[in-house]
Amino acid sequence: MKNFKKIINIVNKWYYAISDFLIDIYRFFKTIWLFRKDLYNYRWHSSHLAVFTFMKTALEDMSNKIESFEVNEKSSKFKQLEKMKRSIKLMKHFIDDDFINLAEKDLGYELDFIKPKFELHEDGLHYKLVNFEEISKHSVIFDRANEIEESMWSELFNILKGQSYSHYEVFLDKSKDKENAYYNWFDGSGLRNWWG
């Protein structure tokens, strides 16, 4: 009987070890399949093709899974989903690098290639730019594109950073409805909260 228990214990150890290994192999190939496009497009020298593509794919997978769960109306998951989808949209702008297109839509005119025209200066030694006004019109588009990019960058990292819990303690002290205080304070941001 004692030997039989030893055999059962050994078989159980091997069974669980092999089943864990097979589950890990399955998860590995499932993850490879999920990130296949990102792995193919990965470039070590490009931040938008390195970090943001993997993060965007992971957030899309997470948000789809969270959406599929039935959650009651008063859950913070809806706020989290809203912030996840916003950060996915912002990351897509950085991956596509379409800030000039956004600036063109915002300002209402398109960027055309204008060949600079030069004339010989009176001194005969230097050239001066003749069509400066046409070219400077395009600098407005580039300036607006930079403003859009900086504001989106700031918004993205504010979403990922999340709220400060020290602010929650102050909010909780002032709140009359202590039971729903966290739900009322929490805006859905914070990468740490999305994996909770």
Image: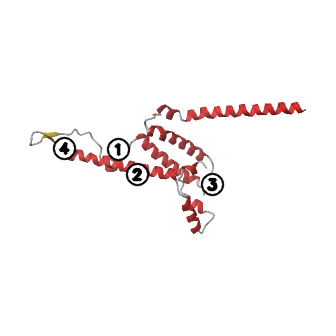
Asked whether disc 1 touches disc 3, contact meaning CB atoms under 8 Å apart, the reply is: no
Asked which secondary structure carries label 2, the reply is helix
Quadrant of the snapshot with the N terminus: top right
**Label 1 to label 4: alpha-carbon separation:** 22 Å
Mark 4 Cα shell of 10 Å, populated few (<14), some (14-19), many (≥20): few
Q: Is 7 in front, or is 81?
A: 7
Which residue corresponds to the image point at 62% horizontal and 52% vertical from the top-left?
A: 71
The disc, 2 or 3, on the residue closer to the chain's N-terminal end is: 3
Mark 2 or 3: the one toward you: 2
The disc, 2 or 1, on the residue closer to the chain's N-terminal end is: 1
Asked whether disc 2 touches disc 4, contact meaning CB atoms under 8 Å apart, the reply is: no
| Relative to 30, residue 92 above or below | below
Asked which secondary structure carries label 1, the reply is helix
Mark 1 or 3: the one toward you: 1
- Residue on which the image places disc 3: 72
User: In the figure, residue 27 lies in which quadrant?
Assistant: top right
Counting from the top left corner in percent of width and height, residue 123 is at 9, 42
The residue type indicated by label 2 comes to Ser
- Numbered tag placed on residue 100 in the rendering: 1
**Label 1 to label 3: alpha-carbon separation:** 41 Å
